Amino acid sequence: MIMSNGERMIFLSSVLILVNAGQGQECTEMIRNKEYSCSGKNLTCIPGSLPFTVASLDFSFNFLTSLHKGVFPVLLNLQLLDLTRCHIRQIENDAFCNVKNLTTLILTGNPITYFAPDCLNYLYMLQKLVLVDVGLETLQLRINNLTKLQDLKVGTNYIQSMTLPPFMSTFKDLSLLDLHANNISIIRTDHTTVLREIGRNMTLILSRNPLLHIEPGAFKDIILRELHLQAAFISLNAQKECHKALNGLTVDRLFVGRYRMEEKIKLSDPDYLDGLCSINFNEIYLIQKEWSDLEMHLFRCMVNATKITIKKGYINSMKHIPFYRLKELYLSDTGLSVVPFISHIPSLEKLVMKSPFPITFIGISDLLLLQYVDLSGNMLILNDCCSKLFLRTPNIQYLNLSQNSEIKFFDEPFSALDLLEVLDFHHTKLVIFFYFGFLKHLANLKYLDISYTHVHFINLAFQDLHNLTVLKMAGNSFGGDTLSYHLQNITSLEVLDISQCGIEKISIRSFTGTQKLRHLYLSRNKLMVLDFLTQPELTHLTSVYIDKNSITTIPLDVLQKLPMNLSEFDMSSNSIDCSCSQTDFILWIIQKQNILKQLENIRCKSFSPNTDFKATDFDIDYCVHKKRLTIVLSVICVTFIVVLAILVYRFWFYIQYCWILLRGYRSPGQQECSYDAFVIFSSYDEAWVMNELMENLENGVPPIQLCLHMRDFQAGKSIASNIIDEGIMGSRKIIVVVSQHFIDSAWCRFEFELAQSRFLMERSANIIIIILEDVAERKTKKVFGLHKHLKKNTYLKWSRDMRFWIRLRQAILRK
């Protein structure tokens, strides 16, 4: 059949659609309910096999080239569409008509060269539009129908002006305009006209733009939620002048400075941040990469701030700045060698300070509003903590002194901090001189972390902690049976972590009074039994972690009494005993896979040091069959003995003579053969043997000595002994005369089997078969081994021809 060009194109298109439809069926991987991913499948079209209920589709890193009307199947429930880096070059009009209920559209990283005027038609519900790194040169986009737009991300493009289209002044829901990493260098008053009209809840990101000049008043009367200006200036002088030009701007959160990965810069002007005095802000976040040999007035323009965050700062001291609104102060990775004197900031509620270098702390006082103190990770050494270091600060509720060097406590160290709710000392060495009064006065404490603090729990008591809900003591040690009375007064406890404490046994009475306990962590101990989990006080447990212990099994009575609400049970990395004696335990593991954590690490290690396989792979059926087999064997044991006795009685004839054969067997090297051949034949064939066989062989040249039981067996010996000793063992070869009478003779069959036994032991084929008369093949099978012997070896068929006797003599005399 010959097709035209048009028909050929239609045909190829159809094939392509079918191929891609097949690909789509392979790529529709459901991540969660109604969320599908086809990412990185090298597809060239949206799969038509997607269910119409799909709400989220990740189609990133594929090949679409262009978006045209009908490129999407009808997916009216689709809300999120990710087309990141799909090599899209053009978007045609009405491209999204079949997905018109989208709320999020991501087109990041596509080299788009053509946006059709009405390409975003139908997207009236769109709230988030991401056009990052798509080659945009202007913000004058035809998006006037996107009246519900909230986030517009157009970073990493070539935009030179932040002027928004006039119609966007009606976009009252717009809350994010991300212009990072563009080519904006100048901002004039007319550039911010629309921005001024949009509203007060806007976040504006101008980071990584080469800002050179901002016209004074360009941001006057503009109120922003956030303004990001990190690394947004072409020089430090431009930064200072642009900050001044922001006069009249009001912003809740101001992000300035640089990025952590940038190199530090030496300053000649220590007042480079003075321009910030022109901006009205509540919170400021500064990453300082600038340093100077001169004193820098870092906080001079921050006196009105309510929150100050300094990261990677190069400051050696913090003077008495007259803060009167400051509530939160964060100092991270600065050059300060001491905790700054902040007692002159009466409004302060929160202090966080972290330094990679050792610092000194001489104390805080007279801060009545201070509630939150985090001095973790500063390598502090405190000689008398804690009330004496926090004088007249009665409202502290959160105190974190973890990951420091060493802290010493004397009698009643928290007497003036009785409102504490969170106390954290983990990974800090604690030296406690008076254990009994250590935690006294902390009736409001809800969270206590003293993990890995080198504490030996002997005399330490948790009296009066009736509100404590979380207690972490991992990495310490317990003396004797102290754990049995440590927890009895903590009636509100919900989380307990005593991992890696060297615990070998937990007393049944240890959890008396802890009826609210939900989460129990016992990892990396030396526990062998879990009978304590059956206590009535632990019925509300939802998660138990006993990984890396010495658990080999859990008895059935314990399994049956485990808390009913357990949803997480981690018993991984224990040496589980996988044997048929533990089938109840293994079956429980298999049935509880939905609650067991790290199931792949619950492994059997009981057979040998090298045995290591998952407990869920243990063959329970094998054990069931083994138990059944044991029962069956025990039941039929008597029957077997009876049957065996019957069989012995029935076949005693064969057993007796086989025993004689084995007992009397000697290798050819141990005895000399008296005869050239022993003849096995039926008495009905005696005439042929005597007149033909014996006459031609014994009277021939050379004579061949035959052994015939009728003339050569010794008197006084049993027939069986004669057959073995004189006949089979005394002859070099065996001649078997096969006839119908031979087949029917039990003695002939018995002699033949004995002959086979001898030559089987010697691994030689010294049996010579003479077919005296034709016998049906099925009848030869009546003699054990005869049919198989005839199939695998040559035999002689009786004839009066002289060649028969010549061949027979050769067979007998051949060594």
Image (spheres, rainbow, N blue to C red):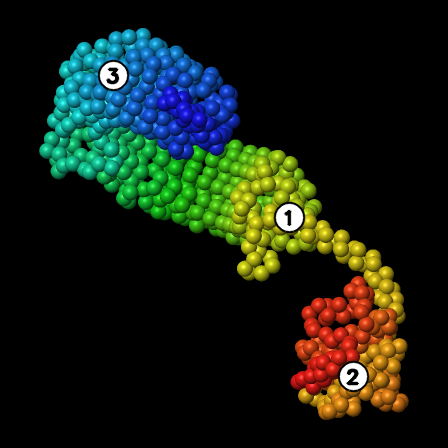
Q: Residue 304 sits in which quadrant?
A: top left
User: Is residue 647 positioned above or below 35 on the image?
Assistant: below
Looking at the image, which is closer to me, 506 or 597? 597
Front of the two marks 3 and 1 = 3
Q: Residue drawn at (49%, 23%), measured in percent from left and top?
A: 54
Q: Which residue is mark 2?
A: 678
Write down the residue under mark 3.
139
> What amino acid is found at the position of numbered circle 1 in the picture?
Ile
The residue shown at (47%, 49%) is 476
- The label on residue 122 is none
Q: Are marks 2 and 3 in contact (CB under 8 Å)?
A: no
Q: Nearer the viewer, residue 300 or 82?
A: 82
> In this picture, is 155 found above or below 511?
above
Instruction: Say whether disc 2 or disc 1 marks the residue closer to the N-terminus.
Output: 1
Q: Is residue 712 visible?
A: yes
Tell me the amino acid under the disc marked 2.
Answer: Phe
The image quadrant that residue 802 belongs to is bottom right
Judged by depth in the image, the label closer to the viewer, 2 or 1, is 2
Give percent across and percent down for residue 433: 43, 48
Return the disc, 2 or 3, that comes first in the chain's sequence.
3
User: Against 224, is 497 above or below?
Assistant: below
Q: Residue furthest left?
A: 268
Q: Residue at x 78, y 91 (%)?
A: 699
Q: Mark 3: which secondary structure?
A: loop
Residue 370 position, x and y percent, is 36, 28
Q: Amino acid at mark 3?
A: Leu
Mark 1 highlights which residue? 586
In the displayed structure image, the side of residue 465 where residue 638 appears, left or right = right
CA–CA distance between discs 2 and 3? 115 Å
Q: Quadrant of residue 63?
A: top left
Q: Looking at the figure, which quarter contains the C terminus?
A: bottom right
